Image (spheres, helix red, strand yellow):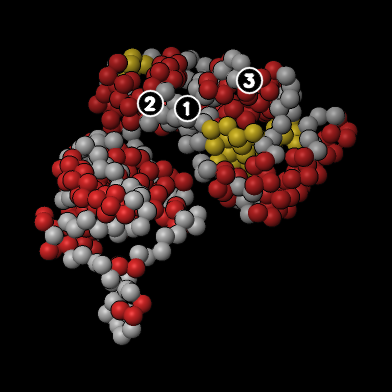
Amino acid sequence: MSLFAETEKSNFEQVLPLAARMRPATLGEFVGQRHFLGEGKLLERLVRADRLSSVIFYGPPGTGKTTLARLLAGESRSRFRQLNAVSSGVKDVRALLDEARDRVATAGQRTLLFIDEIHRFSRSQQDVLLPDVENGVVILVGATTQNPFFTINSALVSRSQVFQFQPLSDEDVRALVQRAANDRERGLGKHEVMLDDEAVEFLVEVSDGDARRALAALEVGVLSTTARPVHFTRALAEESVQRKAIEYDATGDAHYDAASALIKSVRGSDPDAALYWLARMLEAGEDVRFLARRVVISASEDIGNADPQALPIAVAAMQATEFVGLPECQLALAQAVTYLACAPKSNAATVGIGEARQDVREGRLIPVPVHLRDSHYGGAKRLGHGEGYEYSHNAPGGVAAEDYLGVEREYYRPTDRGFERQLGERLAEIRAVLRQTRQKDA
């Protein structure tokens, strides 16, 4: 290598951010994702058997998708080529595929084609990849932060293994921060960094499993401090961290996952978790009308008659949201969400209407009993409509021994929680009276 080449390489390395310099050189150095890369797990087995085919890496930023793609190129003895779906078109894809075919023909070497943000490729761009993915000319590694089953051509997904990346664990981030602080060749070791435990724990906490964010804060803090050795305190860590942008697409996967977490937290009677997910969606710019609708639905779906006040409170929050808007409507939504979370729970009404509609859909249709049919028009009496009907208000207790369905069905089964316990006791008495008619007819 020439002197100029060495100088150029050194210059490029100097401007690389710490996270890039600390990228692992081997799979052994790779941190995290043991659920598919650990010993005996699927991706590890594919690499060990030299049977790596096309894969899709799906997960949040800073979890190692790009790094692992580079390492897999080395493990599979393939040439690494990279495209970004935002800035590349069909012409770029075709050129790289032509190059990959030539490489196989002349050197017998495959190409690992890494496409970042592959979900941004159009359907036609994704279709261009299919033939060479199928015949093994390229090992496609597509990286995406969006659910591939929603955003990527189903034909491409069906030909690929999908590996879901998880945020790095606290232990993983902690190890990376300490390694970067001590490494004298690639890290910040030459700056003599003394890490306070509180500072490390702060970086671990705010990184939210994103290694790049933790390492970026560490680098800013160290390089902006003139004193040597560098005493990296919690205060310095706090000054070096940027507010993390919330990954959220109001029409995509994150939207539905956050909404699901909110409703399940309410259903699970955890007001603290419910408030967090509500705050997460508000901070991300979620439509407050959508939130209000979900709160109203939850009041009936998960609480129902166990607390009859739940639905009026939810509806009031919805009306307040429409009336006052942001930011004040967050107070009404928070009040409703915490009330619903703490309320006794019942899905008896939800289950009941589901079973009744299922009967109707499956053709178990019950004719309206003659005595219940409309008798307010001329000729109704000649047909016998309304004959034998007993007016409930004239019966003892307001419940007449009447058959309102014609067959034995019990769709509504009250729980023993909250107000529904009282309803259940009353319903048992009511049903005993109603059964008298069927027993008499029998």
Q: Which structural element holds mark 1?
A: helix
Q: Which of these two is toward me, 429 or 115?
A: 429
Q: In the rendered view, tell whether residue 221 sits above or below residue 256.
A: above
* N-terminal-most mark, 2 or 1: 1
As displayed, is residue 214 above or below residue 342? above
Rendering coords of residue 33 (x, y %): 52, 24
410 w.r.t. 216: above or below: below
Q: Residue at label 3?
A: 44
Classed neighbour count for the residue bearing mark 1: other residues with Cα under 10 Å, few (<14), some (14–19), many (≥20): many
Residue 263: x and y, percent?
32, 43
Q: Which of marks 3 and 2 is nearer the N terminus?
A: 3
Q: In this view, does 279 lie to the left or right of 93?
A: left
Q: 22 and 351: which one is in front?
A: 351
Q: Residue furthest right?
A: 106
- Going by the numbered disc 3, the residue's amino acid type is Glu
Residue at position x 29%, y 49% from top? 439
The reply to whether dot 2 and dot 1 touch (C-beta < 8 Å) is yes
Q: Disc 2 marks which residue?
A: 218
Comparing 128 with 190, the one in front is 128
Percent x, y of residue 191:
40, 18
Task: Give amino acid for label 1.
Answer: Leu
